[in-house]
Image (tube, rainbow, N blue to C red):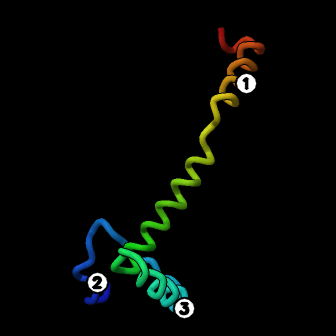
Amino acid sequence: MISVFKELDKEKTIISIPRMLAQKIHNQIKKTDFTTISEYTTYILREVLSESIEKEKISKSDEEKVKERLKGLGYLE
């Protein structure tokens, strides 16, 4: 690893993004409480992953339909 990264937190990693995107993020965070591109990017990634996980959850009505179908097939009592 290059010596510049000696102080890198062991719980973090490095992700490369295009320079133009980094500049856009830098300009965007000037209007926020984020102090670094890394903080902002981490926040956005967590939000996107959270939304993705929420979409994967089964609704209560869908869950009930599945249970009824399994009962009808004799898998549940």
Q: Is residue 69 shown above or below 74?
A: below
The residue that appears at 22% across and 80% down in the rendered structure is 7
Closer to the chain start, of discs 1 and 3, is 3
Alpha-carbon span between mark 2 and mark 1? 53 Å
Q: Identify the residue at horizontal 45%, vertical 73% (top origin).
A: 41
For mark 1, give the secondary structure. Answer: helix
Task: Please state the horizontal and vertical placement of residue 26, each as a whole percent of the image.
Answer: 44, 86
Using residue 21 as the reference point, say whether residue 35 is left or right of it. Answer: left
Q: Residues within 10 Å of mark 1 (few under 14, many from 20)?
A: few
- What residue is drawn where x is 71% and y is 25%? 66
Separation of residues labelled 2 and 3 (CA atoms): 22 Å
- Relative to 69, say whether 15 is above or below: below
- Amino acid type at image mark 2: Phe
Pointer 2: what residue?
5
Question: Disc 2 vs disc 1: which is toward the camera?
Answer: 1
Relative to 39, 7 lies left or right: left
Pointer 1: what residue?
A: 65
Per the model, the C-alpha gap separating discs 1 and 3 is: 49 Å
Hey, which quadrant is residue 36 in on the image? bottom left
Q: Dot 3, crowdedness within 10 Å: few (<14), some or many (≥20)?
A: few
Q: Which residue is mark 3?
A: 20
Q: In the depicted view, which residue is nearer to us: 30 or 9?
A: 30
Q: Secondary structure at mark 2?
A: helix
- Image quarter (top left, top right, bottom left or bottom right) of the C terminus: top right
Residue drawn at 36 percent across, 74 percent down? 33
Give the number of the mark in front: 2 or 3.
Answer: 3
- Give residue 18's position: percent from left, percent from top: 54, 87
Q: Residue furthest top?
A: 77
| Image-quadrant location for residue 1 | bottom left
